[in-house]
Amino acid sequence: MNRMKKDAPSAWIVIALIAALGLGVAGSAEARKADWVAGWGFSIQGLAPATTVVTNETVRMIARPTISGELVRVRLDNTFGTVPLTIGAASIAYRNNGAQLVPGTVRPLTFGGSTSVTIAAGQGVYSDALPFVARAWEDVAISLFVPGDATGQISRHNNARTTSYLTDAGAGDHTTDETSTAFTGTTSEMYWVSTIDVFSEAEGAVVFLGDSITDGTGSTTDGHDRWHDIAFLRTLLGSKKDPTKAFVNEGIGGNRVTVTATQSSPAAVERLDRDVLSRSGITHVVFFEGTNDINSGLVNAEQLIAGMTEIIQRVKARGLKIIGATIIPRSSATWTPLKTEYRNQVNDWIRHHADFDAVIDFDEVVRDPTNPDIMNPIFDLGDHTHPNPFGYLAMGRSIKLAVLEGSASNHE
């Protein structure tokens, strides 16, 4: 059994794999252009309930990379775990339908050359670089066999909006099964899998840091119709070439910018390094938060602006571009006129004073034309907080894609 921390595969291993695959030698222009880029990601936000256990069984987590490349590596995180997590076997394959895999595509994942790995509590690990062709918008399945019953509570993302699959407890190792027969259960959560990196010639990755409106509450499960999905599809369908930028969703439902009481996930200022700045190859951050801070009743406009300013400064200190999004109207039962006043103050700052490289004005897109303090009913999920799928469509269509290349402001 191999015990590992955060070490990624060394550069010489990657170069050797490139040469073996005929992708170019280390000194060629083509090889120099390629690098690791986060092609897909989810923030691990907390622990599953103690009643949710994985015991001598296999989980099959479904993900959809957004760039193409010839090598992949997968990151597993035991972020909130209180005991070590043992993975007895792991694999990656193309997903066909449901838990079924495309025949002949299963490839074992290794960790430091071993087929198994133990991840310490609070730690994470990348798999070894693996020759496996990732294609933008093609589903892959990450299958993990967890032996025994000593995993502790599961580190998870609890609103993946994607169906993944589980065998029965005690069913054993089914990581290489191409059929779906053994996978009798489903979950819409993402267990342990936090990132898929692709060794790619893409220009980099755009990370979307946000709350439930970025996470996708109100979007269609398995529909991939969140606002940033719509923006990505515009880039994908608008060209016959592979996308030049990966889009990585790091939204968490209920997330706040600032550190206050009663939070259900680490605030953006706390998780920025882990969920954003640590991602491979990122060039841009789209920052869309603030509504939950205001709704908590614990933060005024000035305090929220201070937290957002910290995020901007830390992102720019890494040489990255950051795009801000205005806070959309909210009129739920806990919302008050004072909170609307705070929202408008923060939005004015975002539009005119914040040090963002560009601004996406979602407030302007979804507000009611007759009452700017509420969401347009045609876009409202019904909770007066989240957009429905048509609202997400409008938001995704409104983005000037050039802002993600750093060449426009998203204003006419």
Image (cartoon, rainbow, N blue to C red):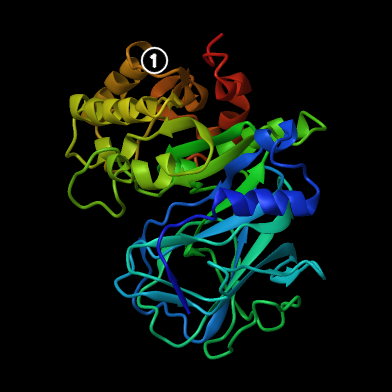
Give left or right: position of 168 versus 293: right
Residue 396, image x and y in percent?
59, 31
Q: Which of 280 and 399 is in front in this view?
A: 280
Q: What residue type is labelled 1?
A: Arg
Q: Left or right of 307: which side holds 246?
A: right
In this orientation, which residue lies closer to the viewer: 342 or 369?
342
Query: Image height check: is 307 above or below 167?
Result: above
- Does residue 399 appear in the picture of this structure? no
Residue where numbered disc 1 is placed: 351
The residue drawn where x is 35% and y is 21% is 347
Q: Residues within 10 Å of mark 1 (few under 14, many from 20)?
A: some
Above or below for 76 versus 203? below
Residue at the front extreme? 27
- Determine the image quadrant of residue 311: top left
Quarter occupied by residue 221: bottom right
Badge 1 element: helix
Find residue 166 and report its horizontal and vertical position in percent. Answer: 58, 77
Q: Write the residue at 69% across / 71% down.
A: 99
The relative height of residue 14 versus residue 99 in the rendered view (above or below) is above
Q: Which residue is drawn at 47% across and 18% down?
A: 358
Q: Where is residue 98 in the image (x, y as percent from the top left)?
A: 70, 68
Residue 33 in the image: state x and y as whole percent.
67, 33
Return the residue nearer the eye: 245 or 14: 14
Q: Residue furthest bottom?
A: 170
Is 156 rendered above or below residue 209? below
Residue 191 in sight: yes
In this figure, what is the number of numbered marks? 1
Query: Is residue 54 left or right of 399 when viewed as pictured?
Result: left
Q: Assign the C terminus to one quadrant of the image.
A: top right
Please give left or right for residue 26 compared with residue 209 in the image. Answer: right
Q: Which residue is drawn at 74% across and 48% down?
A: 135
